[in-house]
Image (cartoon, helix red, strand yellow):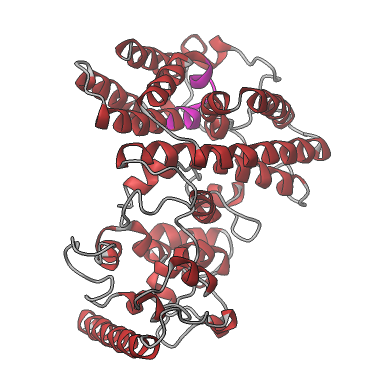
Amino acid sequence: MKIGTERKREALRCAVAGLCAIYFAAAFAASAAPAYPPAESSKYTGPGSCSSTSCHGSVKPRGDSRIFQNEYSIWVIKDKHAKAYDALTGPVGERMGRILGLGKSEQAAKCLACHSLDVPADARAKTFELSEGVSCESCHGPASAWLGPHTTRNWTHEQSIAAGMYDTRNLVRRTEKCLSCHLGTQEKSVDHEMIAAGHPDLYFELDSFSSVMPRHWKTPRESAPGVPAENDAWSGVRDWGTGQAVQLRASMERIAWRAKSKNWPEYSELQCFACHHDLTSPEQSWRQERGYAGRRPGDPPWNASRYAVFRELAHQVDDTGASRLDDQVAQIAKSLSQLNPDREAVALAAAGAASLSNQLAARIAAQPYDAAIALRLLQKISSDADEISNEGERAAEQTAMALDSLFIAYSRTEKTASAADVRAAINALFQQLQNPSRYNPADFAAQMRKVNSLLR
C-alpha cells in the first residue's frame, strides 16, 4: 500500500513539473532575454519537480540534448545521496540518536543537516519533503525561481545563477558544496563524540567520489568559466587537484574555528587509528619499531592526510608557495600532536595555511593538464612511499585514490605495455586498506614502490 501511494505521489509530481514547464515556457517565450526573477522568491520544490521525462527523468540518456536528461533517474536509482535520510532510520542511526541523547535521529537537526535538505519551513514549497534525502536542490540550490525559466530558449546558465542556482560548474564552488557535509562546517560538524557514537570518520576526494556517485553531468562542458578547453581525459586530473586544494583549505579553516571553540582539543583532528587499532605483542608492533619522531610516545599524531599527497601537486604548481605551506602545516602538525596544544598558535597557523591553499586552488583549477604532468605526479607520489605511508591509514587512502584517478586519466591517452600491471599494483594498494586497524606502513610503502617501478 505504501509503495502504491509513493508511486501515485511521484506521478503527481511529474505531472506538476510538466505543467510548470509548459506554463513557464509560454510565459517566457515572448522574450529572448527574460528578466531575472527576484532572489527572495526562491523556494525549495523537491526532486519531483525535476523528474518529468521531458526534463531530467528520462530512463535513458539523450544524445540530442546538451544534458543527459536522465539525471533524476540516476539519482533516485543509483546515487547513495538519495538514501541518506534512510540511514537515520536504520538500527545504527537510531542507536546513534540514543547514545547522543538526540531522540530519533530522523528528527534531530544535527543529523538532518547533512542527511537531508533541512531548510526553514518558509523556504519549502508544498511539493517539498524532508524525507527525500540529499536531493537535487541540496547541490543546485532552491529551484522555484529558475525551475521553469531554465527550460526556455535563450535562457543562460548565468541567469539561473542570478536566480538562485548554485554554480556547480565552478570546480572550487562544487568542492566547497561537497565538503560542507563530507568535511563539515560550524553548522554541520562531525566531531569525536559523534564518531564514538557510531558515525564514520569523514574523508573525501572529489574525483573518486564523483566517479562513484555516479556522474550525472557531461564533461568538459561543466568546466568553470576561463578554464582551458580540454578533452575528457584530463577533467579527472583537474577534479582531483582542485578538490585536494579546496579540501586542505576547508580543513585548515575547520581547525581554526575549532581551536577557538569551547570543545578543544578536538580529537577527530588526530589519526584515529593511532589509538583505535588491534593490539599486538611488542616484538610485532611496527608502531613501536618505527618510533614516535617529533612527539611524545602516547600522544596521538595529527591527521595530515589532506596534505601528505596534495603537497606533491602544490610543489609542481608553485614551489615557492608550497614551501611556505610546508612550514605552516609543519607548525600545525607539531602543535596538534601534543595533548594540550596552544589554541591561539594553532588557529593562527591554520588561518595562514588556509589562505595559501586558497591561492593554490585557483591556480590548480585553471592549470592546463597533459600526459607529462599526470605521469610526473604519478611518479612523484609513488616515490614518496615511506613519508606518505607513515602519515597513517587516511594518508594511504588518499594516496590510493590519487594514483587511481591520475592513472585512469593517463591511460586514456597513453598506451603502455605495463598498463595492466600498474592497474593491478594500484588495486593492491586499496586491498591493504580493507581493515584499517591492520594497516602496516612498511607493507603499503613496499606496494607504492612497486607502482613506481612500473611507471618508469
Point out the stretch of residues depicted in magenta.
387-397
Relative side of 55 to 379, left or right: left
In the image, residue 238 above or below residue 455: below
Whether residue 201 is visible here, answered yes or no, is yes
Where is residue 420 drawn, in percent x and y? 20, 22
Left or right side of 320 for 203: left
Question: In this picture, is 203 found above or below 450?
Answer: below
* Residue 130 percent location from the top left of the image: 44, 76
Residue closer to the observer: 32 or 113: 32
- Residue at 25 percent of width and 62 percent of height: 68
Nearer to me, 91 or 453: 453
Instruction: State the quadrant of the N terminus.
Output: bottom left
> Which image quarter holds the C terminus?
top left
Q: Residue 202 at x, y = what percent?
A: 50, 45
- In this view, the residue in front, 343 or 177, is 177
Task: Count all numbered tags in the image, as a single digit.
Answer: 0
In the image, is residue 389 part of the stretch drawn in magenta? yes
Quadrant in the picture for residue 295: top right
For the stretch drawn in magenta, the main secondary structure is helix
Would residue 429 be found to the left or right of residue 199 on screen?
A: left
Residue 285 visible in image? no
Q: Is residue 182 magenta?
A: no
Please report the residue visible at 28 percent of the width from the left and 62 percent of the height from the top: 66
- Where is residue 432, by image quadrant? top left
* 277 is higher (above) or lower (below) than 176: above
Residue drawn 55% across the image and 84% down it: 41
Residue 205's x, y, as percent? Answer: 45, 41
